[in-house]
Amino acid sequence: MGRRRRPKGRNVHGILLLDKPVGLTSNEALQAVKRLYQARKAGHTGSLDPLASGLLPICFGEATKVSGFLLDADKHYWVRCRLGERTTTGDAEGDRIAKAPVPALDAAAVERALVPFRGAIEQVPPMYSAVKHKGERLYKLAREGVEVERKPRPVIIRELRLLALDPPWLELEIRCTKGTYVRTLVDDLGQALGCGAHVAALRRLGVGAYDDEAMVTLDQVEVRAGEGFAALDALLLPVESALMQWPSVDLKGDAAFYLRQGQPVLVPHAPTSGWVRLYEDGDHFLGMGCILDDGRVAPKRLMATGRPRAS
């Protein structure tokens, strides 16, 4: 039998809050960072278009186990809109498909137009998106000149705030649930204003509990790479930082032992429902769990970076 090939790269665990630059796809940014870290395993948590910049959490090693929770988290954006022009893609990278004069607008008129877009709304995904239709990505069909019917999808716009108005330019701040297409929101707003619009610039400021204050640029990561792995690893946030909105449960002795074997355990004063962060002896992160109907704490995703199992 042949010898099993050992995985290449370092065993790195943690989350990097990358400030993705304009011009790179999310995967290109991920691969650049992964190479600098020489990491064995890494993934990003929600794509940003090449036109967009801003927060792209990159999960290394065991942190990939929390990436799904970051994908599901709320997002926070700043967007600059160009009024009077619609494009094929809904942003500045597309071809112009319609042009109209921008009406005389003031802040009050824009505020009135924004009202229907706040709260629970439905969006039709744009053709230039990664949504699949009969196994094909919509953007691939769009590049072939094919347009198909898309079903509206529910999203929640938690905040939609006018920041600046200087026609034909408009700036907005948006807080929304996962799956929201800012390009679609801007296009629909442009239609409501009677002139059309597209995204001229987009920046993601927040993902879940993370905000832009802790972001690092690709240039900063490259500088740290020249200083060695210790300097690089100092940029990483702990895995559990993605889950700080959950309550924590501290396990001791036998309870921690049996939970690491995959068994639900009874913990006094634990929450009565929902997801929880699991710790041993107060400070050692074990992973994610949930509360069962009978009140026991059940392990769901445990970290492989934990203490060696007791013999």
Image (spheres, helix red, strand yellow):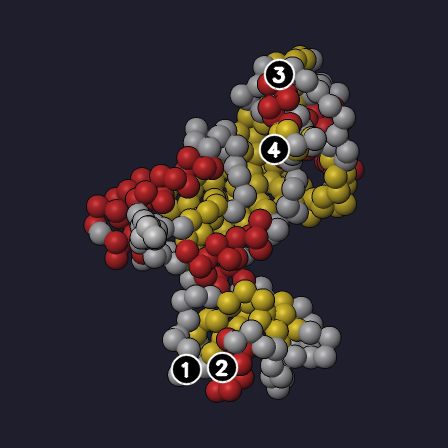
Q: Amino acid at mark 2?
A: Phe
Q: Which residue is mark 2?
A: 257
Q: Which sits earlier in the primary sequence, circle 3 or circle 2?
A: 3
What is the three-letter code of the residue carrying label 1?
Answer: Ala
Earlier in the chain: of badge 2 and badge 1, it is 2
* Separation of residues labelled 3 and 2 (CA atoms): 57 Å
Q: CA distance from mark 2 to mark 1?
A: 8 Å
Q: Alpha carbon of mark 3 to alpha carbon of mark 1: how far?
A: 59 Å
Q: Residues at badges 3 and 2 in contact (C-beta under 8 Å)?
A: no
> N-terminal of the two: label 3 or label 4?
4
Kindly tell me whether residue 213 is visible in this rendering.
no
Query: Mark 4 = which residue?
Result: 130
Numbered tag placed on residue 210 in the rendering: none
Q: Which is nearer the N-term, disc 1 or disc 4?
A: 4
Q: Sequence order check: which comes first, mark 3 or mark 1?
A: 3
In the image, is residue 95 above or below residue 125? above
User: What's the distance in space between the residues labelled 3 and 4, CA to CA?
Assistant: 15 Å
Relative image position of residue 229 (x, y in whole percent): 25, 54
- Residue, disc 1: 310
Residue kind at label 4, given as amino acid type: Ala
10 Å crowding of disc 2: few (<14), some (14-19), many (20+): some
Q: CA distance from mark 1 to mark 4?
A: 46 Å
The location of residue 40, given as percent across then percent down, is: 36, 51
* SS class, disc 4: loop
Q: Residue at x 67, y 68 (%)?
A: 274
Front position among marks 1 and 4? 1
Which x, y percent locates residue 201?
53, 29
